């Protein structure tokens, strides 16, 4: 299946004095698949090694010999001269060797003619808790996420629909009603599958027949997340805390106070007890944080209130699976109070996949803006509505108070632009178009 990150990999290949490339992402987002595909299609010589399986390389880099000797012996173990022209080395599960991660600096400085790509499960956690120094500035790092809605449509052979969505987005012109409704129905399918490639492929294989869709795919991914929670932890107690934090997130999405509350994990819980566990989940890329800002000014990061934030799951399909929602209720919009929470999680995912850091704003009263985007047009407020009712006092308060160049309203309504109110209307299925 086509992935947008492929283009970024091509750009890395064509860079001069290429640094080693490290791909970070949650389990099952397709890292190994796309790296393997890229390497096979773009290099004459391709060497792949998995450190789970090749402990000899792990032992080599744990030894006390110097970097030059390790490099010579690495070539011997691989059975190939990786300095040969048009060669790429893919090191999978590199988190199994902290010393090899540290040695990437050596490759960058002494052998920058070698193309090296690294990836691994829970690599972000390992980097955060590594005992060895990370080669800062010597490694190119790219985050990989589940498939966004555009990639989902590509997988379903809906390229013509993508073209129409992009055209309407750019021109603020309404889409033909029948096509608009078709796109909304596909959006609902995405709420079921999410963007995990195996899940999307299965929906394609059953020709979008929800009855035959294999719901165990997402359940198995969730199970693998829980099994991962025993890895790279300080002790068994932390593993249990990580699981409790994760399990609390779906219910926290409907908090009336619109923020993550440690007290909702277990009664009486304090931030000091669970901050480390929350950090583990963030580093693993299976949750994402949206930070409250005290003032929607440039730069947003400078106005973050570190003790107030929201937490979303990394994939909306994972969320609907965790909530055990019947697919028929998703398709008929019978989601009650959770419709808004699921919609907001979807939008958070799509914005993150497009490279935006996530922020939101609250007034001293009850006004709240779901997302703030730092763009070339300044700070742009984004309001999310799960249906076609778009009345909003919060957005009106924000517009009067801060007078942004324009605002974005995401809902089930068709495209449009209200010149008087300066509000750009974007259907939920077109969030992937929002790019700076």
Image: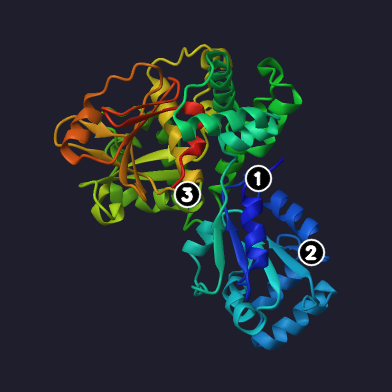
Task: Give the vertical position of 311 relative to 20 (above or below).
Answer: above
Closer to us: 199 or 356:
356
The residue carrying mark 3 is 355
Image location of residue 399, percent across then percent down:
22, 34
Residue that label 1 marks: 3
Number of numbered callouts drawn? 3
Q: Is residue 381 left or right of residue 129?
A: left
Q: Is residue 199 visible?
A: no
**Residue 340 placed where, x, y %?**
39, 24
Q: Residue 38 falls in which quadrant of the image? A: bottom right
Residue at 44% over, 34% down: 347
- How much space separates mark 3 and mark 2, taking CA atoms? 28 Å
Q: Residue at x 78, y 75 (%)?
A: 82
Residue 234 relative to residue 212: left or right: left
Residue on which the image places disc 2: 43
- First along the sequence among labels 3 and 2: 2
Whether residue 284 sits left or right of residue 424 in the image: it is right
Q: Return the residue nearer the eye: 416 or 355.
A: 416
Q: Position of residue 185 (x, y in %)?
A: 57, 18
- How far apart are the two marked residues, 3 and 1, measured between alpha carbons? 15 Å
Which SS class for mark 2? loop
Q: Are marks 3 and 2 in contact (CB under 8 Å)?
A: no
Q: Earlier in the sequence, mark 3 or mark 1?
A: 1
Which quarter of the rendered picture does the N terminus lie within? top right
Q: Earlier in the sequence, mark 2 or mark 1?
A: 1
Give the class, few, some or many, for how many residues have Cα within 10 Å of label 1's Cα (few <14, many ≥20): some
The residue shown at (69%, 42%) is 2
């Amino acid at each position: 299946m086509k992935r947008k990150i492929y283009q970024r990999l091509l750009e890395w290949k064509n860079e001069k004095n290429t640094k080693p490339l490290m791909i970070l992402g949650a389990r099952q987002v397709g890292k190994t698949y796309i790296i393997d595909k890229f390497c096979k299609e773009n290099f004459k010589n391709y060497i792949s090694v998995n450190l789970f399986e090749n402990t000899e390389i792990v032992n080599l880099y744990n030894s006390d010999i110097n970097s030059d000797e390790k490099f010579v012996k690495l070539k011997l173990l691989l059975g190939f001269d990786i300095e040969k022209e048009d060669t790429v080395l893919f090191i999978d599960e590199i988190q199994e060797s902290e010393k090899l991660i540290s040695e990437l600096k050596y490759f960058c400085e002494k052998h920058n003619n070698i193309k090296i790509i690294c990836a691994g499960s829970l690599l972000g956690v390992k980097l955060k808790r590594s005992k060895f120094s990370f080669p800062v500035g010597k490694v190119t790092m790219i985050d990989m996420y589940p498939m966004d809605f555009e990639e989902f449509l590509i997988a379903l052979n809906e390229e013509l629909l993508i073209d129409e969505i992009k055209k309407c987005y750019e021109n603020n012109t309404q889409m033909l009603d029948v096509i608009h409704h078709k796109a909304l129905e596909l959006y609902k399918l995405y709420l079921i599958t999410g963007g995990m490639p195996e899940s999307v492929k299965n929906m394609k294989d059953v020709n979008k027949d929800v009855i035959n869709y294999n719901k165990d795919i997402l359940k198995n991914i969730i199970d693998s997340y829980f099994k991962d929670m025993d890895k790279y932890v300080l002790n068994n107690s932390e593993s249990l805390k990580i699981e409790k934090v994760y399990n609390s997130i779906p219910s926290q999405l409907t908090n009336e106070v619109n923020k993550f509350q440690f007290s909702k994990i277990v009664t009486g819980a304090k931030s000091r007890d669970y901050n480390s566990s929350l950090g583990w989940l963030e580093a693993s890329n299976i949750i994402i944080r949206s930070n409250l800002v005290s003032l929607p000014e440039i730069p947003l990061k400078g106005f973050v209130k570190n003790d107030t934030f929201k937490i979303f799951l990394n994939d909306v399909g994972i969320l609907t699976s965790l909530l055990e929602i019947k697919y028929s209720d998703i398709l008929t919009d019978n989601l009650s109070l959770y419709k808004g929470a699921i919609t907001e999680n979807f939008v958070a995912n799509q914005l993150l996949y497009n490279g935006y850091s996530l922020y939101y704003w609250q007034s001293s009263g009850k006004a709240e803006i779901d997302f703030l985007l730092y763009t070339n047009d300044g700070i742009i407020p984004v309001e999310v509505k799960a249906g076609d009712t778009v009345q909003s006092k919060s957005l009106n308060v924000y517009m009067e108070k801060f007078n942004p160049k324009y605002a974005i309203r995401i809902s089930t309504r068709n495209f449009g632009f209200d010149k008087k109110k300066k509000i750009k209307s974007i259907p939920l299925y077109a969030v992937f178009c929002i790019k700076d």
